[in-house]
């Protein structure tokens, strides 16, 4: 098949959507499909285009995979309006390359959301060449915008949801990453015959046999004898990571516990300032590490934090959780019991510790519980092996879109 993948985030971004889109493209190309990707230069989570890339049009090719990168506006300090301009700029710059793909005649076009702003050209292209249209929802951006009050006016809310419903129902297939997000699509009025479960995955074999690596921690400047509480990933508004710093403040008299914050994002400097204002010595900040270090990093933590604000926990499913489960990590998840994450914890007791979001007291109690759990977490590892294997998930997706 000739497959076009269209989305704003892609490899070599190491976190979230870019990582999964990159791995999907590589996997499909390795199966012998001709794959073209239309995307932007890597900018996330730093909100700055990487130095080795230019914010201009470029083409990269390797065997069956071609990557076309289109420029976009990248705000250094994203606000609601700046995020909208950011997404619109990519939609505009990529419009002609997408429609130009008609000469290549793809059999399947996969649009990865965010962003819905790209849907017009996707649907025009698939009409022109009579290709199957697939929209894969990694993040319900409309829901997140309103539920997290990133857009604080209700003026456009009703119309935004109506437009979203009309757009999604125009696609042949609507896939998303969790059962809760599929249920949400159904509640939005999406034809159930179009819906497809396509979860994020883990390279289970890479993670399942890892154990705590003292040398790795020493090289990072971390005392391996301490109990390590780890947050690794994007440091953005929707995570509500101030609660982690306040939790560290509650543990400052416990010299056996060290908090580790790894990643980048728009609130990182704010978090570092907050920890400085509280005179905390039990919390350390690091930039994102190479993906090759991830198995050692995750296996070396005694407690993993999967933190989100109330309202975000069912709009998105944190991609970091798949690898935490594969390594057998003990997690503290902040989510309500009726969300996808809450239902996961109820269906598989012991897979993680579920606590109320945006409560420092609940987070502290959850961390204390997680630090007492045996390692590795056998329930988490078993779940990952049965449900999160990369080859199994992508093989099923390939069959469904063929």
Image (spheres, rainbow, N blue to C red):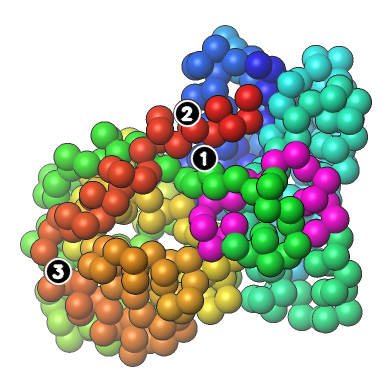
Q: Can residue 234 be seen in this view?
A: no
> Residue shown at 86%/60% (left/top)?
163
Q: Nearer the viewer, mark 3 or mark 2?
A: 2
> Residue shown at 26%/84% (left/top)?
365
320 left or right of 163 in image: left
Residue matched to label 1: 20
Quote the CA–CA distance across marks 2 and 1: 15 Å
**Neighbours of disc 3 within 10 Å: few (<14), some (14-19), many (20+):** some
Q: Can residue 330 be seen in this view?
A: yes
Asked whether the beta carbons under mark 1 and mark 3 sit within 8 Å of each other, the answer is: no
Q: Residue furthest top?
A: 63
| x and y percentages locating residue 272 in the rendered image | 43, 71
Q: Going from the N terminus, do you reach mark 1 or mark 3 first?
A: 1
Q: Going from the N terminus, do you reach mark 2 or mark 1 first?
A: 1
Whether residue 195 is situated above or below residue 42 in the rendered picture: below
**Which element carries disc 3, helix, strand or loop?**
loop
């Amino acid at each position: 098949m000739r497959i076009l993948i269209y989305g704003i985030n892609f490899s070599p971004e190491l976190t979230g959507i870019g990582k999964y889109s990159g791995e999907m493209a590589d996997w499909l190309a390795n199966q012998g499909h001709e794959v073209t990707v239309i995307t932007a230069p890597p900018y996330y989570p730093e909100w700055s285009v990487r130095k080795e890339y230019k914010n201009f049009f470029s083409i990269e090719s390797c065997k069956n995979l071609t990557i076309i990168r289109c420029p976009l506006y990248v705000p250094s300090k994203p606000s609601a309006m700046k995020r909208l301009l950011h997404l619109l700029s990519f939609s505009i710059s990529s419009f002609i390359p997408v429609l130009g793909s008609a000469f290549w005649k793809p059999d399947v076009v996969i649009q990865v959301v965010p962003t819905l702003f790209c849907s017009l050209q996707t649907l025009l292209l698939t009409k022109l060449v009579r290709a199957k249209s697939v929209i894969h929802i990694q993040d319900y951006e409309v829901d997140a915008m309103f539920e997290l009050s990133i857009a604080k006016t209700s003026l456009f809310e009703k119309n935004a949801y109506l437009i979203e419903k009309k757009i999604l129902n125009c696609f042949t297939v609507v896939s998303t990453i969790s059962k809760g997000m599929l249920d949400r699509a159904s509640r939005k009025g999406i034809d159930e015959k179009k819906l497809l479960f396509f979860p994020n995955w883990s390279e289970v074999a890479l993670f399942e046999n890892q154990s705590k690596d003292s040398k790795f921690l020493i090289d990072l400047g971390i005392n391996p004898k301490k109990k390590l509480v780890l947050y690794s990933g994007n440091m953005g508004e929707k995570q509500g990571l101030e609660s982690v710093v306040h939790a560290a403040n509650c543990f400052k008299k416990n010299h056996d516990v060290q908090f580790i914050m790894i990643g980048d994002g728009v609130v990182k400097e704010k978090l570092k300032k907050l920890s400085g204002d509280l005179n905390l010595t039990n919390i350390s900040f690091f930039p994102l590490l190479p993906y090759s270090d991830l198995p050692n990093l995750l296996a070396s933590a005694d407690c993993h934090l999967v933190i989100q604000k109330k309202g975000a926990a069912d709009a998105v499913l944190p991609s970091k959780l798949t690898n935490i489960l594969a390594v057998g990590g003990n997690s503290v998840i902040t989510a309500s019991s009726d969300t996808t994450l809450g239902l996961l914890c109820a269906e598989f007791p012991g897979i993680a510790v579920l606590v109320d979001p945006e409560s420092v007291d609940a987070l502290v109690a959850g961390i204390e519980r997680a630090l007492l759990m045996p390692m590795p977490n056998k329930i988490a590892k078993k779940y990952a092996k049965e449900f999160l294997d990369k080859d199994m998930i992508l093989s099923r997706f390939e069959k469904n879109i063929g």
